[in-house]
Amino acid sequence: MAAYRAPSLFQPHRARQALRDANSGKISPLIGLYLGISTVPTARFVAPMGYDAIWVDWEHSACGVETMTTMVHEIMFMSEGKTIPFVRVPGHDHAAIGWALDAGASLVIPQVETVAQARHVLSSSKFGTHSRGTRSAPPFRLIPGVSDICHDATHPLGIHANLNAAAAVMIQIETLEGIRNLDRILTEVQGIDAVWLGTLDARVSMNLPGNGGMGGEESEWLDALQLFDDTMDRHPEVAKAGFALAAMPGFAEKAKGKAMVFTGADVMALMGLMGELAMGREVIAPLKRVMKGEVQKENGTVHGNGIANGNGPVVNGNTNA
């Protein structure tokens, strides 16, 4: 994503343009990593790996504004501008949306169900009444003449118009009501760059088993998915995004049609440690440790530490040949 970085790494990438280009097929879909355990060292470690986007989950973690801001900066600077940070904000709070944008991130907005909610979050993310914006202009987040250089210097509204055009807004549809209202949302609210169907929350809200967000075969669920897909087909200008975990079955099918695909997650990688633990117990448990002074094996020899190696039983660290 270096081609979409801003003149300063303190500014957001031109993520809106990147999503448009991926959605139109001009570039390949963006490949992302989800960080569910929001810590600065994690962000610093994964930032240079080469992902196009990294998702910082502020909604479902204990990190505060300073931690979120530092994670965004780590992703920007440690990737040398090659990775776009997306922050999922906790709800629709005007201030939280501003903090994430001030940090230099693009947005993931959870639990959007209505036109009114969509208008509120878009307004919170934009400067100026031309964009129906109510975002407050931070006076010194960017240093005049140093980090406020514009990508498009010809725009009469300067840096604030550039910022409006840069950071992407992705909404999450996570309830049946949201699915039913999505057509109106995308028709009546301008500026939504991508839509993510939150399958876990959607299923839970429909009183169906969560299934880890992996879906299901219930008729009402399949009807909801069809309605979502049909709605998105009527709005081809809006990008689709979602998980398609590379380690899961049906990876390619889940990635199809998406302009941004999150193929990995820190939490999934850590859960893989349980498999290593099980393997370790299976292989290592039968290998009983030889304790000094304990008879472990008939016809064995022993070194001074009591480990059998040869002929004769081990007794109190000595061989009895």
Image: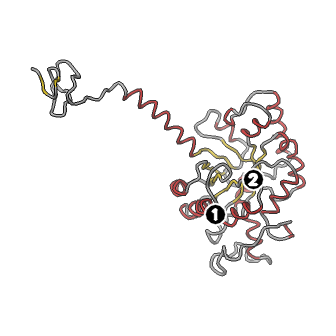
Taking the spot 76% from the left edge, 31% from the top edge, the residue there is 208
How far across and how far down the image is residue 52, in percent?
62, 54
- Residue at the spot of label 2: 91
Helix, strand or loop at mark 2: loop
N-terminal of the two: label 1 or label 2?
A: 1
Q: Nearer the viewer, mark 1 or mark 2?
A: 2
How far across and how far down the image is residue 27, in percent?
68, 54
Q: How is the image coloured?
A: secondary structure
Q: Amino acid at mark 2?
A: Gly
Specify whether 71 is left or right of 311. right
How far across and how far down the image is residue 249, in percent?
62, 32
Q: Nearer the viewer, residue 206 or 170?
A: 206
Residue 20 lies in quadrant: bottom right
Q: Which mark is residue 3?
A: 1
Question: Which image quarter is the C terminus in?
Answer: top left
Please tell me whether residue 93 is drawn above or below residue 262 in the rendered image: below
Taking the spot 69% from the left edge, 38% from the top edge, the residue there is 254
Question: Which image quarter is the N terminus in?
Answer: bottom right
Residue 94 lies in quadrant: bottom right
Q: Tag 2: Cα neighbours inside 10 Å, few (<14), some, or many (≥20)?
A: some
- Taking the view exactly as shown, the residue that stands out farthest to the bottom is 145
How far across and how far down the image is residue 188, in percent?
90, 55
Q: Amino acid at mark 1?
A: Ala
Taking the spot 74% from the left edge, 46% from the top edge, the residue there is 196
Measured in 3D between alpha carbons, the distance from the residue under mark 1 to the one under mark 2, in whole angstroms, is 31 Å
Q: Tag 1: Cα neighbours inside 10 Å, few (<14), some, or many (≥20)?
A: few
Taking the spot 22% from the left edge, 20% from the top edge, the residue there is 297
Q: Nearer the viewer, residue 143 or 195?
A: 143
Helix, strand or loop at mark 1: helix
